[in-house]
Image (tube, helix red, strand yellow):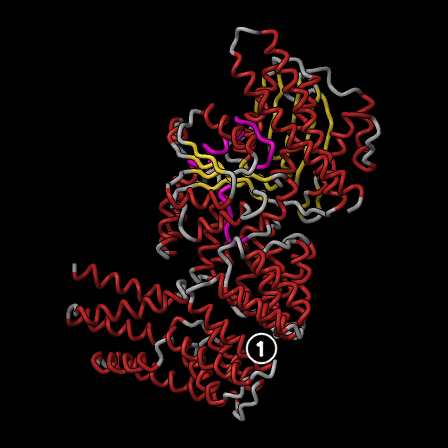
Amino acid sequence: MRFYRHELEKKSFLIVDDFGDMRSMLRAMLQSIGVAGIQAVASGEEAIHSLEKAHFDIVLCDYNLGPGKDGQQVLEEARYRGLTGLGSLFVMITAENTREMVMGAVEYEPDSYLTKPFTKELLKKRLEKLVARKKNLEAVERAVKQQAFEKAIQLLDQQIAEKPRNLGELTKLQAELCYRAGDYGRAALIYENALAVREMPWARLGLGKVLYAEGQLEQARELFQQLLMENEGLTAAYDWLAKTLQAMELPSEAQELLQKAVILSPKAILRQRSLGELALMNGDGATAEKALSQAVRLGRNSVYKHPAIHASLARAKAENGEETAALKILKQMDREFEGNREAQLYSSMVEGMVQAQLGQDETADACLEQAKGLFDKLGIGVSPELTLEMARTCGRLGDLEGARDMLRIAVSNNHAEEGFLKEVGAVIEDLSLDQDAAHFIGEIRSEIVRINNKGVELVRIGDLEEAVALFEEAVGRMPGNQVVNLNAARVLIMRMQERGINSGQLGRTRQYLERVRAVDPENQSLRRVQSMYQGLLEQAG
Amino acid sequence: MIFSDILASIIHDMKNSLGMVINTLEGLDCDQGRDDQAQSKQVRVLQHEAKRLSNKLIELLTLYKIENEHISPNIEELNLCDFLEEIAAENQTSAEAQGVRVAWQCSPDLNGYFDEGLVRGVINSLIGNGLRYTRRELLVVAEEEDGYLVLRVEDDGDGFPPEMLAAQHAIDQAGNASDGNTQLGIYFAGMVAKLHRNRDREGLIRLSNNCHLPGGCFSLLLP
């Protein structure tokens, strides 16, 4: 690994620490290393502001930043919004007593943790090492960003073959990428190889995720339970075990487990949210209210802030008989998400339910009408969960026809999502729609399957003209269905490969791909059709 | 909040203040240049003592966590050269102040599995201790031996007295921390070693004399 001394000196630094003394100390350390480009700020908010305005090569951020955003939230927002580019380093400075708390955050990890106190020499050594490694990983990161996982995995193969010092880190990264690319077999192999050398929680956890993804729930459950027995502090294992239990239709066990996990790491907003929503489903209003209040509070400084959390909290309050408090939450939500249509939809929906509970039927009906209007305006941007929520709301407010429409949309947009369809079935039975759930879902599904099969047959006999017509007609009726969108894009590309590029068809192809990417960027078929599309463009020059 | 929690949080605060002191002293030392040798030496003594104090506080905090919070070590695969390079850099200034050279030695492709923070704490303490007994050199060695990763801190002082060598098994088992300063360090190292487990084996510590250097040699064996 090559490294030139002056590289560190040329880097631009952002220091984030709420203590003035600490800021000047870090600045002095960097200056003595020879760094000139240094900016220092005192809070997470200022850090985000600085990152919005300028590019920094290296961010040194303390985890504890007083009131407001903490270091993890700065990291999440910076990465989520792409404020720190590829090749930028984020170093989290922690005191040991926060280390475990920080480790609970799995979604975004910093490039390195540095535990206080540390000396100038250690800082320098660590930064030099990180800069050199980051440089070697640049091509891999670029590929990952473009969702070109196969390429990233291949690049890692080359690096691993050279047996570098950070072999462990690279192997772990490669396994994760195999998992994300859906190559579960290879991911499992890497994890098993690592475990053959010695027992390691990250590898065991990875293996559990593979089992879960492959639907081997019983084995996944056993594995996560064992892992937790040996590592009580491993919060990610709680999340995965809870997920597994939910998939096994054991919601109260899942809730119990998440309750334990939030005691260990009370600051994890996503976990508080899952717990709250699960408790709400289980009819445990008290737990739901507590967890969701936490999630709303934590959301204030977080990229994971979402109107659905406020909406669920309002529902929990209503469930607990606190209608006035529920309406107050909705008001607060309207203010916090001003101009956000999805938030307005959540708000009208929940308000409708609360008003009905208060006996204000007319207001409730008005809310429902408003919600329906917003739903239509949002179009295919509505998430499956939100569609289902609309169905529930219609049903509870006595609009059974509306509920049926929503359920139809929910099924036809997600006809291949087994887990989701189970939920749809539960709602149908819940609302006593006088309808057999299996029959209702089955009919819509078989229609879509029929279209897809017919399309495949048309492609086989070479009638692309008809196949395009068939899928485009289907897309018109089911604009939110990923499979139909992808098939329409695929046959359009095949047709253009044969007959040459047509700008109208090219535009529609892009639109169909875009729809899928918006809801499921890691969809594996999407990546395949995407590369067909790239190939078409290259072929046309 | 129980008393030990309050104590831990105070120690934590003290440790952070001390961190500021250490780094401010370092700044002082750099600013002064060479014109005031005597004062510069005083600053270095202060720095060294502050660092020792800081290591002790870290030991205390870690012990508190081991006993009260059932911490599970965060085992990662690490390259030993990277690790030792950082350790040597970290301790270089205060060692130089005492005219001691800190050297390290390991094969470039040696990787090991351990909790970086915990083991760093142990090695730093051992170096801090070693600085008191050594003459001109401290050597940190990492190597593999019978399936254990062995981390050794060696000095060229007089070595451990025979009583201590003889009593080390008792230390292992009972964790007797009664005999002052060195013993707390040994107890701490032993606790950290025990937290490292692989299958049916757990980590341990060994005291010996005359390894590569003529003085004492403290080994941390991790499975």
Residue in the image at 49% along x and 72% along y: A346
Residue A432 x, y percent position in the rendering? 57, 89
- The residue tagged 1 is A354
User: Image quadrant of residue B19?
Assistant: top right
Closer to the camera in the image, A370 or B167? A370
Indicate the amino acid at tag 1: Val
**Extreme bottom residue here?**
A434
Residue A349 shown left or right of residue A228 in the figure: left
Q: Is residue A303 visible?
A: yes
Q: Position of residue A207 (x, y in %)?
A: 55, 59
Q: Residue A540 at x, y = what percent?
A: 16, 62
Q: Residue at x 44, y 48 (%)?
A: A78
Q: Nearer the viewer, residue A414 or A431?
A: A431
Q: Where is residue A410? Give x, y as percent.
A: 45, 79
Crowd tier of the residue under label 1, counting other residues whose Cα lies within 10 Å: few below 14, some 14–19, many 20 or above: many
Residue A125 is a magenta residue: yes
- Above-or-below relation of A180 to B79: below
Question: Is A377 drawn above or below residue A531 in the view shown?
Answer: below
What secondary structure is found at the residue carrying circle 1? helix
Instruction: Choose top left, top right, bottom left or bottom right for residue A524.
Output: bottom left
Question: Which image quarter holds the C terminus of chain B?
Answer: top right
Q: Which range is magenta?
A: A106-132
Task: Give the quadrant of residue B144.
Answer: top right
Please indicate, yes or no, whether residue B105 appears anywhere in the rendered image.
no
Q: Nearer the viewer, residue B27 or B109?
A: B27
Is A197 within the magenta? Answer: no
Identify the chain of the residue marked 1, using the numbered disc in the image: A
